[in-house]
Amino acid sequence: MLPLDPIDSVSPLSPLSRLLRSAPGAEVRAELDRVEALLGAGRDPAAAVLDGGPLVAAALGFGRGALALREGALDAAVLHLEGAAAAFDRGGAAEARDLARCEAALARLRRDARSACASAIEELDAIAAAGDPGRRAAVVAAHYRGTAERLLGDAAAAQRTLLSALRRSEPFLGERAQILNSLGTLYVTLGAHGAAEALLEHAAELHRRRGDAVGEAIACGQLGAAALGLGALERARAPLQRQEWLCARLGDAFGRARALTFLSELALELGRADDALALAISARDVAEHAVPPLRTWVAYASRAIGRARRDLGDPGAAAALDEAGALFRALGLSLGEALAAWDRASTEALALAEPADWFSAAWSLGSLGLSSRVAQLLRECLEIKEAAPLQEKGGPTSDGEARERALAAAAQTSPHVAMQREVELVYDRPDHLAAIAARRTAAQRNLGRLAALTLARPGLIVAAIAASPLGARGRALPPERAMAVCVADLPGLAVWIWPAAATPATIGNDLAVLRATLGEPLRAALAFAPAGRVLCPPFAGDTGAELDAVELVGLIALPVVLAPGELRLDPRLGWDGDARASVEALGFVVTNNPCHPG
């Protein structure tokens, strides 16, 4: 028995299960109230027993919990769904009980995020193991386990779990469509946009055939994101417009504000500032009038309003951008704060204020793995510089040429070949796809940081690192929380760089993480290049970044003669006793290099 079966027969023309998939929340709530009044399940427990017993009350509780989950009222969702599971258990309806338990676990995951993952996985595994692995509840439990693994950041495990659930979902069309949504969302997050697009197109079609407007809206929103990730701006518009239309029908303020904001950003990218302004104003209105207000989308919509007004020459642009920046800071949104820093830099540059801090924004965006955003920032920086009076441009012509190359490198891509291959791998060799996507994400993060460093002040700290596992599987690519950037990766040898402002503790921590990744002690020689600069990141097929005033020949030879775990320092780094001690505390032996390479 499914959880809503005891009450779906009461309204055969519009069963509650269908309304939950396709009707506005107010309509679903009204139908729940009508059924409750008709059966007497709310006011008179005795009448409830006569008209269906505890299963009717359980089904009504499940319906209210499912609606609360759909609307994001997560405390209410947990309360209703856990109560429904207990009532189904008392009524001997095991399948309905387990499905209610699965939905309650999902509500806790959405409410509590990572802190709920371990207990949710334990409960979902127990549900899946309790009976036939092909039953609906077991498939749903596997699906939500994959959701928990994604929240934990274990993309490979999430992919395996979701693909296993997908293989068992053939008898359950609705569950299959939702699993495809989750897989597509995972691949968007991983940057495997070709695979995401193929899966989400299938999901959207299945949702459409079932009349599931809620599921279709989610699929369309992620389809738009996948198309944007592939650089297919025109192709992104249709699914985002479809999401906006569906969410307007459903009364889904979150989905509608999201779609309108994405459409506004898309119009800006296509040079249609007037369209962008109208869309962004609509997005902000929707977000502000939601209960409670959707502050995240208010911030993103305000930023789009500011940028559109700036492109239209409206003096009110600065106020909207300032409002967005303040909201991003209040909400602690790392992407939003990076975008606000970008806006400040462009405003300063347009006002001919000195210095415009393009580097901070570019570095933040690059560290988030958003090399395409760094490319957009570099383009805007160049356009503003080119439009400035000659005396304000500053810098030699060769530097401008290097910036052009940096922009081209940051924007490089080959989406069509990648997309075709991803579609093949998602079905034939999904583990390979996960590994490729993870490697590409790390490489894009490194590329974004290299592109950002083209805007930094002169001065680099350089490390030549020797260890036998280097030079394979991208092990030398620094992780997200590191500050290092990789500029060379050869068998047994890598070269990392840091901005001159990097602290000894930061450098020591980054090297300690690399040591743990490699699984063996490393040997490293560190030097300071006071005039060192990154001129250009590598193009596809290049062997390394284009550096200026960085001497590597002598430095690369040093690690060979060092003992395992030894860090040889250039005295020009100026590390004092406390700095050396902080690095030695991480398990390294710090020694001085009496003569440093120039």
Image (cartoon, rainbow, N blue to C red):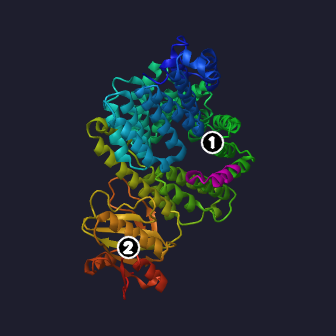
In the image, the segment drawn in magenta is 323-336
Location of residue 175 (image quadrant): top left
Q: CA distance from mark 2 to mark 1?
A: 42 Å
Location of residue 189 (image quadrant): top left
Dot 2, crowdedness within 10 Å: few (<14), some or many (≥20)?
Answer: many
Q: Secondary structure at mark 1?
A: helix
Q: How many marks?
A: 2
Q: Pick out the residue farthest to the right.
A: 315
Indicate yes or no whether the magenta region holds residue 585.
no
In this image, 86 relative to 173: left or right? right
Residue 397 locus on image (x, y percent): 52, 63
Q: Quadrant of the C terminus?
A: bottom left
Q: Residue at x 38, y 66 (%)?
A: 513
Q: Which residue is mark 2?
A: 463
Q: Please state which of residues 484 and 104 is positioned toward the viewer in this rendering.
A: 104
Q: Residue at x 70, y 50 (%)?
A: 323
Location of residue 470 (image quadrant): bottom left
Q: Pick out the residue farthest to the top.
A: 13
Say whether marks 2 and 1 touch (CB < 8 Å): no
Label at residue 297: 1
Q: Quadrant of the N terminus?
A: top left
Label at residue 473: none
The main secondary structure of the magenta stretch is helix
In this image, 115 relative to 302: left or right? left
